[in-house]
Image: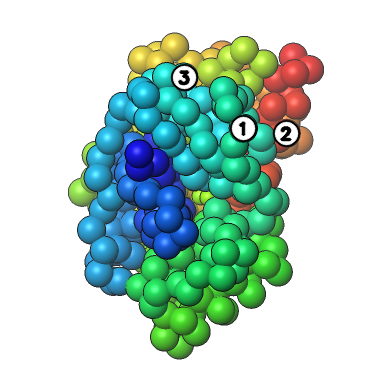
Amino acid sequence: MSMYVVGHKIPDSDSICGAIALAYLKNQIDEPAIPTRLGEISPETKFILDKFGFEAPELKLSYAGEDVFIVDHTEKTQAPDDIDQARVVGVVDHHKLGDLTSSTPLECWIRPVGCSNTIIKMMYDFYSVEIPKDIAGIMMCAILSDTVIFKSPTCTTADIKCVEALAEIAGVEDFKELGMDMFRVKSAVENTPARDLVMRDFKDFNMNGNLVGIGQLEVIDLAVFDDIKADLAADIAKLKVEGNRHSVFLLLTDIMKEGSEMLIVSDDANLVEQAYGVKPENDKVWLEGVLSRKKQVVPPLQDAFLKA
Ligand code: MG
Ligand code: MG
Ligand code: MG
């Protein structure tokens, strides 16, 4: 029986490239595996797959009765809807430990590094499996994306060393320039409906019993949002109502200025000030130095919810 290797809902480049890279590794060690995805790929991921000659993994939403290896999260809200009827055989992740459990012993690769693909590279090394050139390319791009070309506070020495090694294998000389090309693709937001932008990198969290959605758009210049910010704000208000959420936050991250503007709709906007120590005005706030949702945005907010 083959296992399916799948990342989170609203897949990012780490989820997609990680599923492909890990499924390849598993197949080399006689554990048949098929990479899959839980949603449409982003323009950034399409850029990466096209560049190195890959098709997107098969779209598969139901996993009841199947073996599943989870990539890039351990959260029920981000897993397939019927994950409770599947057998979780493994996880590879670099986020806080979530609420996914397993019914049988599982293989667990969790490290506090900048990207799941950095851990997958460690797995290749552990099993002494050679990484093909094209797979090295997509793994490298996933790490550059998750670490915001090493600028994110989540980035570790392991991530940097890993990118350097993968660039060598992939034959990419200027990997930082390739990273900038990726973020240029990511910054093209014109002619895209507000809902598509809000959902492009959106995650729901359970914070002390409250459903909290946090989206993030990482661009090289926040000016791209000047004409559409009002539409984005209106759309997260709708999303809050539709999903019965306590709050929806949208992070507009400027990777060059290294900070994020947060758009806010919440049943209790005071939580934002409690979490980040800055007072929102007109339902938005500038968070200086904030690039990482997982490391800088979620933990203080979670604390604020616990104290509320
Ligand atoms: Mg991810
Ligand atoms: Mg990741
Ligand atoms: Mg990210």
The quarter in which the C terminus is drawn is top right
Who's the residue at 44% across and 12% down the image?
A: 244
Who's the residue at 75% across and 18% down the image?
A: 306
Question: Is disc 1 in contact with disc 2, using a CB cutoff of under 8 Å?
Answer: no
Residue 109 picture location, percent across and down: 63, 48
Q: Is residue 140 above or below residue 176?
A: above
Who's the residue at 28% across and 50% down the image?
A: 57
Number of numbered tags placed on the structure image: 3
Per the image, the residue denoted by label 1 is 105
Mark number displayed over residue 84? 3
Q: Which residue is at the front of the view, 226 or 18?
A: 18
**N-terminal-most mark, 3 or 2:** 3
Residue 306 appears in the rendering: yes
Q: Separation of disc 3 and disc 2 at Cα?
A: 30 Å
**N-terminal-most mark, 3 or 1:** 3
**What's under tag 1, amino acid-wise?**
Pro
**What's under tag 2, amino acid-wise?**
Pro
Local crowd size for mark 3, using a 10 Å CA cut-off: few (<14), some (14–19), many (≥20): some
Tell me where residue 246 sits by quadrant.
top right
Local crowd size for mark 2, using a 10 Å CA cut-off: few (<14), some (14–19), many (≥20): some
